[in-house]
Amino acid sequence: MSVVVGVGVIIINNKGEVLLGKRIGKHAPFWSIFGGHVDPGETFEECAIREIQEEIGLTIQNPQVYGICNNIQTYHDEGKHTVSVCLLAHHSGGEPHLIEPEKCDQLIWCDPNNLPEPHFEASRTAIKLWQAKKFYLSV
């Protein structure tokens, strides 16, 4: 088994809210920020821009890497080990919409201090890192 590298992107609006999706399918019923796996030869920023465009139809500008999380609980629960590079992007307008309804069936803007439950491990860790201004938190 190998370790997979992914990105998780916090998109914040001018009210300081984060954009979350309600997962369906294999990661149901968790709420989460958006992101996905890094393709070979792709930068973290390119991956973030591509995944956000593919999943919710937004074009993000200048996403910034701010942290990394090692998703050990998900490994124990699902047998898949992912390391997530966390990026931050500001919502620059446009209405997000569900392009992949087989993966996500609801979108909300949410106060990061009052996250809906259940919440996906990588998403929760990414938001904690951002709020604490930390690069990494050991388990």
Image (cartoon, rainbow, N blue to C red):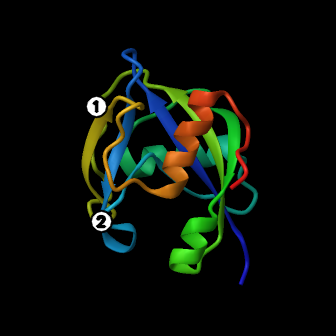
Mark 1 residue type: Glu
Estimate the spatial distance between the alpha carbons at disc 2 and disc 1, rounded to whole Å.
Answer: 21 Å
Find residue 85 and report its horizontal and vertical position in percent: 67, 48
Q: Disc count in the image?
A: 2
> Alpha-carbon neighbours of circle 2 within 10 Å: few (<14), some, or many (≥20)?
some
Q: In the rendered image, which quarter contains the C terminus?
A: bottom right
Find residue 123 and report its horizontal and vertical position in percent: 50, 49
Judged from the image, the secondary structure of the residue bearing numbered disc 1 is loop
**What numbered label is drawn on residue 95?**
1
Confirm or deny contact between disc 2 and disc 1 (CB under 8 A): no
- The residue lying at 39 percent from left, 68 percent from top is 27
- The residue lying at 50 percent from left, 31 percent from top is 60
Nearer to us in this view, 11 or 16: 16
Q: Is residue 89 left or right of residue 12?
A: right
Mark 2 residue type: Ile
- The residue lying at 32 percent from left, 72 percent from top is 25
Q: Give the quarter of the image for residue 134.
A: top right
- The residue lying at 40 percent from left, 36 percent from top is 58
Please identify the residue farthest to the top as the structure is shown: 14
**What numbered label is drawn on residue 31?**
none
Q: Is residue 39 left or right of residue 123?
A: right
Q: Residue under circle 2?
A: 24
Please identify the residue farthest to the left as the structure is shown: 106
